Image (cartoon, grey):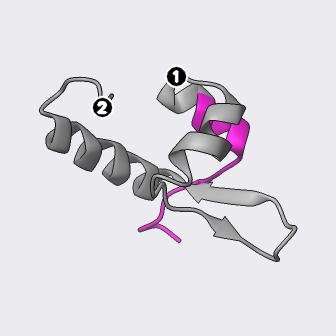
Amino acid sequence: MQQLGDAMTIKQVAKFVGCSSWTVRNKLVPAGLPHFRSSPSGKLTFFREQVVAWVLARQNQTKGGTNR
């Protein structure tokens, strides 16, 4: 588990990224934000290191600007 970092809830990810839980669920997850779902109707679990890597990769794609 050390490589993945701490498990995070959708609310924690939203606060970490600086958006709402709705945005995480409806915009970022479909855009590829790595997550784990224990069952089809289960809650989403995120791992800190995967979230950080995903954010950094997106920053590099947009060269630090916003992706609109």
Q: According to the image, label 2 marks what residue?
A: 67
Amino acid marked by disc 2: Asn
Which structural element holds mark 2?
loop
Q: Nearer the viewer, mark 2 or mark 1?
A: 2
Q: Which residue is found at the position 47% from the left and 67% from the top?
A: 2
Q: How crowded is mark 2: few (under 14 residues within 10 Å), some or many (20 or more)?
A: few
User: Which quadrant of the figure has residue 32?
Assistant: bottom left
Sooner in the amino-acid sequence: mark 2 or mark 1 = 1
What kind of residue is marked 1? Gly
Q: In which quarter of the image is residue 24?
A: top right
Estimate the x, y position of residue 33 in percent, counting from the top left: 48, 54
Q: Is residue 62 magenta?
A: no
Label of residue 18 in the image: 1
SS of the residue under disc 1: loop
Which quadrant does the C terminus fall into? Answer: top left
Where residue 8 appears, as percent x and y from the top left, is 65, 49
Left or right of 33, for residue 36: right
Please tell me which residue is depicted at 21% across the width and 23% down the height of the picture: 65
Separation of disc 2 and disc 1 at Cα? 15 Å
Q: Which label was assigned to residue 35?
A: none
Question: Which x, y percent locates residue 36?
Answer: 64, 68
Residue at 64% over, 43% down: 26
